[in-house]
């Protein structure tokens, strides 16, 4: 039996996770609220260490906060 690492298995499914989020209005609303919250408190050009990266949706948003 060949076992796959959790990271590799997650990477294979990440596009599916993103698609599910894009189609879910509740998740879209929650993501928008999170981004609005970040914009209220993070200074322009702030450095952010994102430890809970998931598929990278927030990691793509955070460097572009201006």
Image: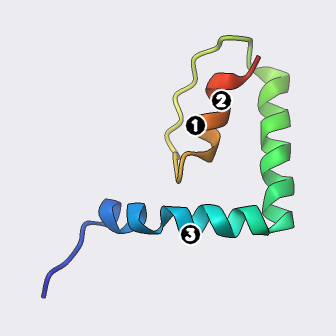
Residue depicted at x 65% and y 66%? 19
- Tag 2 and tag 1, C-beta contact below 8 Å: yes
| Observer-nearest of 64 and 27 | 64
Crowd class of label 2 (few under 14; some 14 to 19; many from 20; radius 10 Å): many
Label 2: which secondary element:
helix
Residue depicted at x 77% and y 49%? 31
Question: Quadrant of residue 3 in the image?
Answer: bottom left
Q: Position of residue 11 (x, y in %)?
A: 40, 60
Q: Is residue 46 toward the left or the right of residue 25 in the image?
A: left
Q: Which callout, 2 or 3, points at the residue further toward the start of the chain?
A: 3
| Observer-nearest of 7 and 19 | 19
Q: Position of residue 46 (x, y in %)?
A: 64, 14
Q: What residue is disc 2 on?
A: 62
| Observer-nearest of 15 and 65 | 15
Q: What residue is disc 1 on?
A: 59
Residue depicted at x 57% and y 24%? 48
Q: Position of residue 37 (x, y in %)?
A: 83, 34
Q: CA distance from mark 3 to mark 1?
A: 18 Å
| Observer-nearest of 37 and 31 | 31
- Tag 2 and tag 3, C-beta contact below 8 Å: no
Label 1: which secondary element:
helix
Quadrant of the drawing holding the N terminus = bottom left
Q: For the view shown, which residue lies furthest in the bottom direction?
A: 1
> Of the numbered discs in the image, which one, if any, rests on residue 16?
3
Label 3: which secondary element:
helix
Q: Position of residue 58 (x, y in %)?
A: 64, 41
Q: Is residue 38 above or below residue 19?
A: above
Q: Which callout, 3 or 1, points at the residue further toward the start of the chain?
A: 3
């Amino acid at each position: 039996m060949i076992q796959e690492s959790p990271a590799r298995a997650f990477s294979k499914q990440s596009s599916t996770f993103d698609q599910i989020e894009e189609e879910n209005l509740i998740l879209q609303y929650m993501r928008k609220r999170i981004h609005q919250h970040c914009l209220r408190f993070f200074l322009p050009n702030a450095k952010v260490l994102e430890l809970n990266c998931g598929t990278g949706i927030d990691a793509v948003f955070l460097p572009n906060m201006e």
